[in-house]
Image: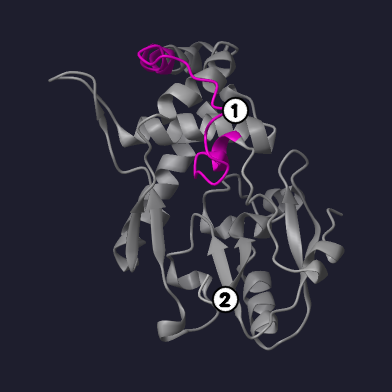
């Protein structure tokens, strides 16, 4: 668009390996300390200076960081960096001024069941996460529910204090997403066995059953919902043969 070529980079790929997390006494991936910021800073500076850089790829099932894409930016390049901590000033190696445009993306629309009962945006994000974790991280719903407290604490410490720094807020809520997510989240939640987590699973199942299930084949391949259910055309998108030829996963 506008003569620019976007290059997506995920901050998740800079998570510390599981062994290094344990060595440092870290257990929470939603803590900014779990991100290898020195490596990210160094690679961003190298990319911006015109060097070819082999980016990392974080494999969630194994907790290991592997070699990913080798990238070299052209003059028409636009870096799209996404991740939980991207609005935190500590993520950037230096002040880039107007070269940086910050976008805060979240489901911001609650749904009203009736005059007294609402479905919160927090529940929408939790259901999205359960589906995404199963599809892309190898987590079952029980693990996602067990980690949700860490996620919420991380939001309060590392996200909400910086959301006001965004240049634009984008509401990613979709009116039909609960219908699509039900077909994927319901069987996952039915497998939760832990007594404490089972109560939360039953609560979420009660909400899901308010919606008619929809399989989602007609969800546009460009929809942001594809970030959670898979099948998007932008997954693994890189704009030139050079990048595609050098893409590897360890």
Magenta region, main secondary structure = loop
State whether residue 84 appears in this view: yes
Question: Residue pushed farthest bottom?
Answer: 49
The residue drawn where x is 42% and y is 73% is 101
State whether residue 147 appears in this view: no
Nearer to the camera, 148 or 213: 213
Magenta-drawn segment: 203-229
Residue 53 appears left or right of 163: right
The correct choice, above or below, for 28 with respect to 216 in the image is: below
Mark 1, residues whose alpha carbon is within 10 Å: few (<14), some, or many (≥20)? some
The answer to if 136 sits in the magenta stretch is no
The residue drawn where x is 50% and y is 39% is 225
Which residue is labeled 1 in the image? 143
The correct choice, above or below, for 93 with respect to 186 in the image is: below
Using the rendered view, name the quadrant where residue 162 is placed: bottom left
Query: Decide: marks 2, 1 in contact (CB < 8 A)?
Result: no
Using the rendered view, name the quadrant where residue 199 is placed: top left
The C terminus appears in which quarter of the rendering? bottom right
**Model colouring:** one colour
The percent coordinates of residue 211 (x first, y second) are 38, 16
The percent coordinates of residue 27 (x first, y second) are 60, 44
Mark 2, residues whose alpha carbon is within 10 Å: few (<14), some, or many (≥20)? few
The residue drawn where x is 29% and y is 31% is 120
Number of dots carrying numbers? 2
The answer to if 222 sits in the magenta stretch is yes
Residue 172 appears left or right of 180: left
Residue 4: numbered disc: 2
Nearer to the camera, 168 or 157: 168
Which callout, 2 or 1, points at the residue further toward the start of the chain?
2
């Amino acid at each position: 668009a506008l003569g620019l070529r976007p290059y997506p980079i995920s901050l998740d790929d800079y998570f510390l390996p599981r062994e290094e997390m344990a060595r440092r006494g870290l257990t929470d991936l939603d803590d900014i300390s779990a991100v290898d910021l020195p490596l990210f800073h160094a690679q961003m500076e190298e990319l911006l200076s015109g060097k070819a850089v082999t980016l990392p790829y974080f494999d969630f099932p194994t907790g290991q960081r592997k070699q990913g894409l080798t990238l070299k930016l052209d003059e028409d390049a636009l870096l799209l960096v996404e991740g939980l901590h991207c609005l935190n000033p500590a993520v950037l190696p230096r002040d880039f001024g107007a070269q940086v445009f910050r976008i805060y993306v979240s489901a911001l629309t609650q749904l009203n069941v009736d005059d007294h009962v609402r479905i919160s945006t927090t529940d929408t994000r939790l259901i999205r996460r359960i589906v995404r974790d199963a599809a892309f991280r190898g987590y079952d719903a029980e693990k996602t529910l067990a980690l949700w407290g860490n996620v919420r604490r991380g939001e309060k410490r590392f996200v909400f204090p910086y959301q006001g720094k965004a240049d634009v807020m984008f509401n990613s809520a979709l009116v039909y997403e609960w219908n699509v997510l039900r077909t994927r989240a319901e069987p996952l939640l039915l497998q939760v066995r832990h007594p404490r987590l089972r109560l939360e699973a039953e609560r979420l199942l009660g909400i899901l059953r308010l919606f008619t299930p929809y399989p989602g084949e007609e969800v546009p391949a460009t929809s942001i919902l594809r970030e959670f259910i898979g099948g998007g055309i932008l997954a693994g998108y890189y704009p030139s043969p050079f990048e595609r030829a050098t893409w590897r996963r360890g």
